[in-house]
């Protein structure tokens, strides 16, 4: 399972399972499936250039529930704004 799929599953879990709210930030190369989920949940979504530094900055300056990049870096609200994702176990970039 790739990082894009994990990001969509995780967003669904955070919203439906935990009831969390907030915006979603994704890199320009990440899946547009996040946009569709955001539309369903009424969450704002924004796009950043490639690189988790842009997503991390967005997480620090806005109420971002989930930040995702195409290589599997995923950041979640109330955790470190880092792309070293514990959600993936072994990131796709290291395989």
Image (tube, rainbow, N blue to C red):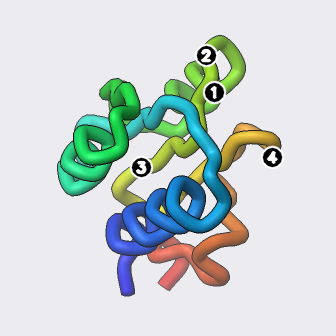
Labels 1, 3: front one: 1
Residue beneath disc 3: 69
At horizontal 54% and vertical 77% (from top left) the residue drawn is 94
Disc 1 to disc 4, how far (Cα)? 10 Å
At horizontal 62% and vertical 23% (from top left) the residue drawn is 63
Disc 2 to disc 1, how far (Cα)? 6 Å
Across and down, in percent, residue 56 comes to 63, 30
Across and down, in percent, residue 50 comes to 36, 36
Residue beneath disc 2: 62
Identify the mark at residue 59; answer none if there is no mark. Answer: 1
Across and down, in percent, residue 74 comes to 56, 55
> Toward the viewer: 35 or 4?
35
Q: Is residue 69 left or right of residue 57?
A: left
Disc 1 to disc 3, how far (Cα)? 13 Å
Disc 3 to disc 4, how far (Cα)? 16 Å
Q: Are marks 2 and 1 in contact (CB under 8 Å)?
A: yes
Q: Earlier in the sequence, mark 3 or mark 4?
A: 3
């Amino acid at each position: 399972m790739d990082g894009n799929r994990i990001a969509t599953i995780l967003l669904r879990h955070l919203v439906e399972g935990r009831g969390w709210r907030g915006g979603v930030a994704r890199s320009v190369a990440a899946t547009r499936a996040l946009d569709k989920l955001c539309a369903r949940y009424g969450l704002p979504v924004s796009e950043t250039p490639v690189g988790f530094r842009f997503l991390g900055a967005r997480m620090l300056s806005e109420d971002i529930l989930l930040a995702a990049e195409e290589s599997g870096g995923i950041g979640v609200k109330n955790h470190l704004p880092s792309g070293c994702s514990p959600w993936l176990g072994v990131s796709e970039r290291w395989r």
